[in-house]
Image (cartoon, rainbow, N blue to C red):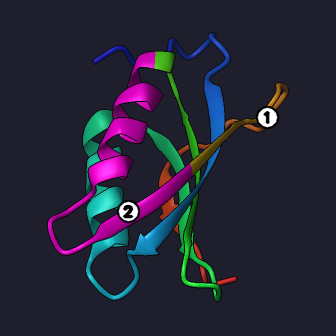
Amino acid sequence: MDSPDKNETPETLQVQVQGRIQGVGYRDACIRYAWAQGITGWIRNRVDGSVELMLQGSKGQLADMCRWLRHGIPAARVDKLEVSEVPPPSPRLERFDRLSTL
């Protein structure tokens, strides 16, 4: 795993996932995958039925996470994945959290 060096500025992405992804365990699976990959950030449901994530890590970690997000878990159906780079400077995120629905 190519985790960023503590002195290196990690890449930051904001991701919006749309489809049948709420109520099927998608967020919990995302959290477990992010932890396993050493990615920091957060995830939350949105009232429109989508899921939003903020991800920080190396380019390789984030590419792997985005590939995983496209397929997710068998109970989910991902219709659309919108990925936006967050330009530096971004505050360093220390863990991966679940936030309240927005």
Distance, label 2 to label 1, CA atoms, is: 28 Å
Identity, as a three-letter code, of the amino acid under mark 1? Ser
> Which range is magenta?
60-81
Secondary structure state at the residue bearing disc 1: loop
Identity, as a three-letter code, of the amino acid under mark 2? Val
The image shows residue 79, relative to residue 45, as above or below, that is: above
Residue 22 position by quadrant: bottom left
Secondary structure state at the residue bearing disc 2: strand
Residue at 46% x, 30% y: name it: 62
- Image location of residue 51, percent across then percent down: 53, 69
Point out the frontmost of discs 2 and 1: 2
Residue at 27% x, 52% y: name it: 71
The residue beneath circle 2 is: 78
Residue at 44% x, 72% y: name it: 19
Q: Nearer the viewer, residue 39 or 73?
A: 73
Instruction: Give the crowd class for mark 1: few <14, some 14-19, many >=20 residues within 10 Å.
Output: few
